Image (cartoon, helix red, strand yellow):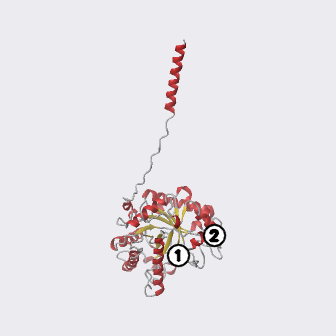
Amino acid sequence: MKTKVLIILNLLFFIFSCSREESVKPTPTPPVETDVVTPQNVKTYMVDKNATTETAALFYNLRNLGKTKTVIGQQDAFNSFYQTSGFSDMKKATGNDPGILGSDFMFITDKDNPSNQWFVQQENKIIADTKEAYAKGIINTFSWHLREPYHENSFYTSDMTATEKADAFKNILPGGKFHNWYKTKLDKVAQIVSQLKDSNGTLIPIIFRPFHEFDGNWFWWGASYCTPEEYISAYRFTVEYLRDTKNVHNILYAFSPDNSYGSANSYFSRYPGDQYVDILGMDNYGDFDNKGTSGANAANAKLKYLSDAAITKHKIAALTETGYRVTSTTPAIPNWFSTYLFDAINNNNVQIAYVMFWTNNSSGYYVPTPGTSNVADFQSFALKNKIVMQHQLKNLYKFP
């Protein structure tokens, strides 16, 4: 009898043990997602398949960095009103230079350059600043406030007649009366970019965002003054002329509307196509104009559209212009940087590679300097783990 009991107990133990082993299964290891973009094939995802090695490395590294970090910078960082000590305003506030330097082709292509020496001086300063930034590992980005083709006095539609506003942009297209004029302006851009070289003769990569904030009506290339097809044609012509006709191969091209869109579809309503865009950008001042949390959430939702699209398209996403301007009559907003802006670029897993603040000048500032009421807020923002400045940049111009 004892023997039978032992056999039964052993059998039950065996069955129990087997059932436990079957029920406690090891947790499967999730598959490791591999990025399809590699140093070897990166140019196939870029606008310029013949881009210089440094330009391709910038695209590759900035795209990867943007998955977890955001570089911050400023327009005219080395040439602003408050720059009295030889340092950028950002360095005076934080001890470190910006990771992005914004410049403009406006004075370089002005009708009075080179007849007016002041414009030549501005051109030389921009070239020198670009070279200085590159030597420090900083990213260079250029906008272009191109003056209208009738009188070349302004880029604002408020300074143009109704006829001029209706005709100007469409006439820079092939066959238009201003097409040769526009090609001459692009010739000057190509000349300058082709001469941007470091001390070893290496071409310096730049980001170029032609016809920015096109969804507004304040510039003569705005949405009310051209059809989507005309805008797309002008953007494509600009890229093809610089890349294919002028053989300029050190440019990344940015698509940069303002913040008017409310959906992914509207964001892409004037999109030139993946073959013409490296960076999906957005300029946004309006959502941050003293609108608190609701404004930050609105900005975050719009950044989410372009961030998700950039991931899908294997591009770079960026907040190409932003800021809140403090003046003698417009006080700073408490926690604007450390709360509202940071939430907009951080929440909902957005991947924003860089943020650029606009320039400081005699009438107001976007980046605080020592002694201003919101400098501590900016310092707190700059110290966040997600935020990257010049001293934290790895070499973006070399492949890992």
Q: Position of residue 18 (x, y in %)?
A: 49, 28
- In this rendering, does residue 225 appear at all? yes
- Secondary element at image label 1: loop
Q: Where on the picture, by quarter, is residue 366? A: bottom right
Q: Name the residue beneath numbered marker 1.
A: 78
Q: Residue at x 52, y 22 (%)?
A: 12
- The structure residue drawn at horizontal position 60% and vertical position 63%, both measured from the top left corner, is 340
Q: Residues within 10 Å of mark 2 (few under 14, many from 20)?
A: some
Query: What is the x, y in percent for residue 383?
Result: 59, 63
Q: Quadrant of the N terminus?
A: top right
Q: Which residue lies under the disc numbered 2? A: 375
Residue 119: image location, x then y, percent: 47, 84
Residue 287 disc label = none
For the residue marked with disc 1, what is the amino acid?
A: Phe
Of callouts 1 and 2, the N-terminal one: 1
Q: Residue shown at 52%/30% (left/top)? A: 20
The residue closer to the viewer here, 148 or 223, is 148
